[in-house]
Amino acid sequence: MEFDDVIMGRRSIRGYKPDPVPRALIEEILALAMRAPSSMNTQPWNFTVLTGEPLDRIRQGNTERNLAGVPHSREFRIGDPFDGVHRERQIGVAKQLFTAMDIARDDKDKRLDWVMRGFRQFDAPVCVIITYDKVLQGSDDTPFDCGAVTTALVNAAWSRGLGAVINSQGIMQSPVVREHAGIADDQIIMKAVALGWPNDTFPANGVVSGRKSVAEAATFVGFDGETETIID
Ligand SMILES: Cc1cc2nc3c(=O)[nH]c(=O)nc-3n(C[C@H](O)[C@H](O)[C@H](O)COP(=O)(O)O)c2cc1C
């Protein structure tokens, strides 16, 4: 696959075939992902790759605790609830997904089912938990580096025909993940990635989310002599 095809074709996959993913393929993808740059080449990331029974225990623990209303215990900070343009984008992609899945605004059962799907890691055959070395806690560079390697991971997966979705849902009940994944105390749980072969008949997998334009995102300084090209 060409680089552009990977970048432009990748989208979050939230429905999977049950088929297993060979360990050798996951190792290949991780090796590609770890070519990501990191602050002073610290490579703060670590991966716990789960499948089978341990992953099922996490799905079950997440489900039970969320249905019981146990408050979330994620190990990273989140800011205030989104507002303005960020809220609009959040609602925009949610609407796309709910439309694809035929989930009506007032259909509480279907909405709950959708949320619980996330806590079950979208029933993917594999889940990768991204952690980082606790001694680096407090540096904003570290989560930035984890983001870089995780983006590279989902793109590498896509290049091999695998689908993935980066998610916070799977690690919101962090004690469940710590216990069943055996995460060491010197690690901070940063994010989860559900991974597997895309189910092409799962409607949400067809959703292509929007992006703001380069003109909106980028400010060019010192390019006065060059002609402006607007790319949407
Ligand atoms: C840090 C991060 C956390 C995310 N958490 C979730 C999540 O908990 N549940 C979910 O369904 N998608 C989650 N996503 C996927 C985003 O919703 C998705 O990347 C975004 O809408 C853009 O869509 P695309 O990946 O298909 O391009 C997350 C993505 C990132 C980068």
Image (cartoon, rainbow, N blue to C red):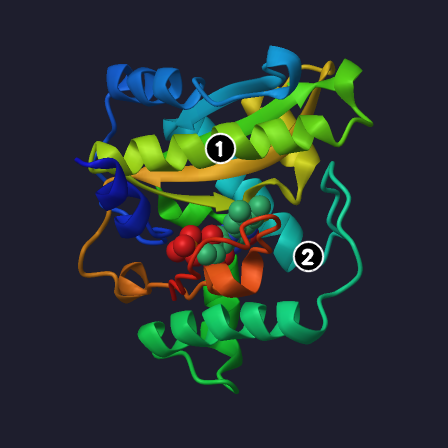
Identified at 55% across, 74% down, the residue is 91
Q: Helix or strand or loop: what does disc 1 sit on?
A: helix
* Cα–Cα gap, marks 2 and 1: 31 Å
Residue 118 visible from this viewpoint: no
- The one nearer the camera, 29 or 69, is 29
Residue 156 drawn above or below residue 90: above
- Residue 126: x %, y % from top left: 37, 33
Please state if 135 lies on the left or on the right of 84 as rendered: right
- The one nearer the camera, 70 or 36, is 36
Residue 184 drawn above or below residue 166: above
Q: Quadrant of the C terminus?
A: bottom left
Pointer 2: what residue?
68
Ligand 1 closer than 8 Å to label 1 CB? yes
Identified at 66% across, 42% down, the residue is 173
Q: Mark 2 Cα within 10 Å, few/some/many (few <14, many 20+)? A: few
Residue 221 drawn above or below residue 147: below
- The one nearer the camera, 179 or 156, is 156
Which quadrant of the figure has residue 25? top left
Q: Helix or strand or loop: what does disc 2 sit on?
A: loop
Which quadrant of the figure has residue 171? top right
Foreground disc of the pair 2, 1:
1
- Residue 145: x %, y % from top left: 60, 27
Identified at 75% across, 32% down, the residue is 140
Kindly check if marks 2 and 1 are in contact, taking CB atoms under 8 A apart as contact.
Answer: no
Please state if 160 lies on the left or on the right of 193 as rendered: left
Q: Amino acid at mark 1?
A: Thr
Whichever of labels 2 and 1 marks the residue nearer the N terminus, that label is: 2
Label annotation for residue 150 = 1
- Residue 57: x %, y % from top left: 50, 34
Q: Amino acid at mark 2?
A: Ala
Identified at 65% across, 21% down, the residue is 132
